[in-house]
Image: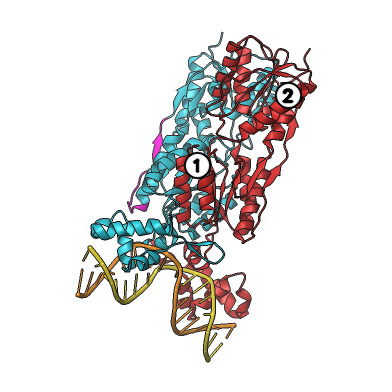
Chain colours: A red, B cyan, C yellow, D orange
Amino acid sequence: MTDTTDRLEDSFGVVRRATLADVARDLKISPSTVSRALDPNRSTMVNKATREKIIESAERLGYRPDIQARSLMTGRTQTIVVIAADLGNRWLTPILHGVASRVSVEGIVPIIAETNDDSRVLDDLIDHMLSRRVDAMIVVGARRGDGPSIERAARMVPMVVAARPLQDVSVPVVTHDDRRGGEMIGQHFADLGHRVVAQLLGPGAVLNFPLRNEGFTSAIESAGLRQLPAIDEALRPTYDEGARLMHRLLDVSSDVPTAVFAHNDPMAIGAMSVIRERGLRIPEDISIAGYNDMPLTSLINPGLTTVRYPGWEVGHAAAEVALRLFAGEEAVESVSLNPVLKPRGSTAPLP
Amino acid sequence: MTDTTDRLEDSFGVVRRATLADVARDLKISPSTVSRALDPNRSTMVNKATREKIIESAERLGYRPDIQARSLMTGRTQTIVVIAADLGNRWLTPILHGVASRVSVEGIVPIIAETNDDSRVLDDLIDHMLSRRVDAMIVVGARRGDGPSIERAARMVPMVVAARPLQDVSVPVVTHDDRRGGEMIGQHFADLGHRVVAQLLGPGAVLNFPLRNEGFTSAIESAGLRQLPAIDEALRPTYDEGARLMHRLLDVSSDVPTAVFAHNDPMAIGAMSVIRERGLRIPEDISIAGYNDMPLTSLINPGLTTVRYPGWEVGHAAAEVALRLFAGEEAVESVSLNPVLKPRGSTAPLP
DNA sequence: CTGTTAGCGCTTTCAC
DNA sequence: GTGAAAGCGCTAACAG
């Protein structure tokens, strides 16, 4: 932004934005020519000399194209919306960055909205974004039961479900394989020689968690270990809820498990603090594993065994899928990325 | 969203969105009447019976107003952009929620953009948002030197600087009093009887940190304590940098301070881990204080003494200021909110 | 209370 | 190569 512009000021010093017509008038040529000269795709259609005059004039007047007006004509708004559940969740950041890195090269801006994990808010948001004529929507905060709303919207605008999976839905889903991740933790416990294990379940309405449960349980069963029944599930996948469930687990069971799988990292960290409070040691008395591989997990002591969640890649892939749909591709396929086990100090062999 | 709509499908089953004209044609009335009936502010101007017919038809056809087209006429886009430095910073979340809670009642959607703490990115972003004709911008990620860009943009659209202060700038600034917060920590150390103190400085280009430094230093001086000179400042206000500076402090100084003020909470937590690594105890050997009162700080052991940063309130107030400017109010004033000291276990009297 | 006309700022035929 | 005219979907001003 230079400041050597002839601004179109009104009597109050407030600036009226220069339009195409202003530039055209300045040069006594037609708006169409200005439009062509300033569009990278069509600028070759106009004489080099006039094009240069136009660029000079546009700069001098501080002309900025009006994206809104353009989109009225072209039908594209250069906007993609990402609908998340909770902006405070750090899990979201890499996903957002992945989306942004893919769409920004197309001159598209991701706009971010938040549902607070409320399906009605999701409905309202979808409605609103339909009104804004966004080019596509990526739902990273879907809950069980949100399928129909999303499918309905998909008839008007490209929709992608990402990060949190949804089953039996006709729109493309970009996730990672939570089932396989759960299996990996179960297998890891078995490899370490544990015999009695337990889970701290995340909320069932967020489908990642039931899948982790399934995978874990199947690995445990096929290895012949014993799993203590889950008493309750977390209301939200947070530190506090992890602590609450861990308390209950230690209160209720007559057996104490030697290895515990918490469905995500914050829950695991909450559980760790409870384990210590109760005078037990990690990993000597209880091994514990989380899920996601958040930045924190390598810093705490001992380091938390977890599964890396490829957030950036999920975001990037979801954006790619959204762009393909917008470009009119028909059968765009779902994507499932692979989990990677990150063994650290919080899990150890049974002595 | 109901699904009992007569959709306007083309031969491929793709849905064309219904427009005002479609509804008008359906009812054989004029588009203006439809427009009026559907606008809450003007719906009283139209006959109750026709209004009801219009609403019914609009619903049946699945009509959604086109916000873009409307804004071309009204000049307002119902959009406010929040420009942040780093979406991964949890400090941001309450600020964003504060903004959203204020603007959403006006039907305005906040768009969130990220600069990665790069002033050139800020420039580009401002430029782009000017093209989108957003109603106002709130810059929460400003760095020293960003003033001129922001002031230039302020001639075209309401601009507010929030959270991170900027000095000598002609746009309203909504912050909290970092100077006073620094003073509080200094005073707290003095009250506890410490004699030799030190700081871990945050990056100087983010003006909150120099202000915290000023406040702290002035309190230390007027209480007659000795402050060890700072060797270096953090490149970014993070855990890692806090750890690095703490290492250097313990390496370089022949004196060991008995109380350390880290310029934010992540830096303080990084420093704590280093202090322990070196075999020193908190708070018996070294007291430590942070800044911001992030969710984590009450969970670690011992709890971190810190200053509460009123993020939600700052966001809310910044949005209020932005809306006032947009409404045409002239001299909207800057706002400065008060810090609150949160003493916890990480600081203690000198034995 | 309702319809007609005009136009927001841009792109897109279609002539020349 | 360039210009004139039309129109995207909506609201605003003015008649009636």
- Nearer-the-camera pick, B23 or A68: B23
Of badges 2 and 1, the one in the foreground is 2
Q: Nearer the viewer, residue B150 or B33?
A: B33
The residue beneath circle 2 is A220
Quarter of the rendering containing residue B288? top right
Nearest to the observer: residue A291 or residue B129? A291
- Residue B40 point in image, percent of width and height: 30, 53
Label 2 crowd (10 A; few <14 / some 14-19 / many >=20): many
Q: Which residues are magenta?
A: B326-338
| Among numbered discs 2 and 1, the one appearing first in the sequence | 1
Q: Residue at x 52, y 27 (%)?
A: A235
Q: Main secondary structure of the magenta part?
A: loop
Snapshot quadrant of residue A255: top right
- Mark 1 packing: few (<14 Cα in 10 Å), some, or many (20+)? many
Above or below, comparing residue A72 to residue B306 in the picture: below
Residue type pointed to by label 1 = Glu
- Verify CB contact (< 8 Å) between mark 2 and mark 1: no
Distance from disc 2 to disc 1, alpha carbons, whole Å, reads 37 Å
Residue B328 counted in the magenta span: yes
Residue B331 vertical position relative to residue B290 in the rendered view, above or below:
below
Q: Is residue A180 left or right of residue B157?
A: right
Q: Residue at x 47, y 54 (%)?
A: A130
Question: How many numbered marks appear?
Answer: 2
Q: Mark 2 vs mark 1: tell me if same chain.
A: yes
- The tag on residue A114 is 1
Which chain's residue wears label 2? A
**In the structure shown, which secondary structural element does the residue marked by tag 2 occupy?**
helix
